[in-house]
Image: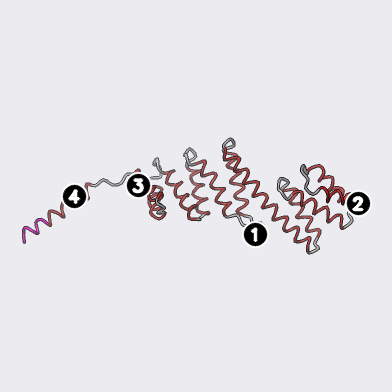
Amino acid sequence: MPLLLSLLLALLIGCSSADETRSPRTVEQIFLDGKKAYDDNDWIEAQSQFDIIKLQYPASQYADDAQFYLAEICYRRGEFVLAAFNYSVVRRSFPASEFAKTSAYQVGVCYEEMSLPPDRDQEYTLKAISAYTEFQAVYPTDSLSMVALEHIHELRNKLAEKYMLAGEHYERTNSRRAAIVYYDAVTTEYPDSKYYEQALVNKLRIYYALAKIDEARGVISVYRRTVKEPAMKTDVDEMERNLP
């Protein structure tokens, strides 16, 4: 029995000594563990490892990597507000990082993901446009700048459509003055949108129906001057012929 106790005691002492001499993980190992978890789609474990780097090693060479992958985890989870915030941190805190450009672009992507249909609030649409525009300003020659421009155009079409829907609603309810206000908003604020021609023609029809001759001729003049590839020219020509 004393011999058995001695052996157990020696084993415990040996394990304790091994624990004391085991080196703590380096920041590199923490990052590699986090990246492996990330590659395995183990978001919770990956986030815990990257959070350690963010909190305990904010000045390390892996700080920007950890911050970027935290943003990526949020994006993959569909947590777009948090993802946009974390991407913004990469862009602001690590401007020289290899992830800075991607992060700047992804801010716009996150806000666009949250952009609602045109008849709803357009807060995130405006934020997406702002983020894409900022990306273009910082990276004007990058290939993604042209992609950002395409997204901006689509988002501006959505904003123009919101005004168009309002104008058409007021037109249907015989609130023609209110309808004209919204059609004017389309033509003045979003002349590059696909709704520009339709807004002009809708406004022309209202003036034509109200026998406002001078106003109708003014709209026709703008139409002839600004619509380069008219799809509704026949309608405009007919109304112009029938004006007194």
* Label 1 crowd bin: few (<14), some (14–19), many (20+), radius 10 Å: few
**Mark 3 or mark 4, earlier in chain:** 4
Residue type for callout 2: Leu
> Under tag 3, what secondary structure?
helix
Q: Earlier in the sequence, mark 4 or mark 2?
A: 4
Stretch in magenta = 1-7
Dot 2 corresponds to which residue?
A: 243
Task: Give neighbour class at mark 4: few <14, some 14-19, many 20+ (Cα, 10 Å).
Answer: few
Q: Amino acid at mark 3?
A: Ile
Where residue 167 sits in the image (x, y, percent)? 75, 57
Residue 30, labelled with which disc? 3
Which element is circle 4 on?
A: helix
Type of residue at label 4? Ser
Mark 1 sits on what residue? Answer: 120
| Number of residues whose C-alpha sits closer than 10 Å to that of mark 3, classed few (under 14), some (14–19) or many (20 or more) | many
Image depth: mark 4 or mark 2 in front: 2
Residue 235 shown left or right of residue 114 in the figure:
right
Q: Earlier in the sequence, mark 2 or mark 3?
A: 3
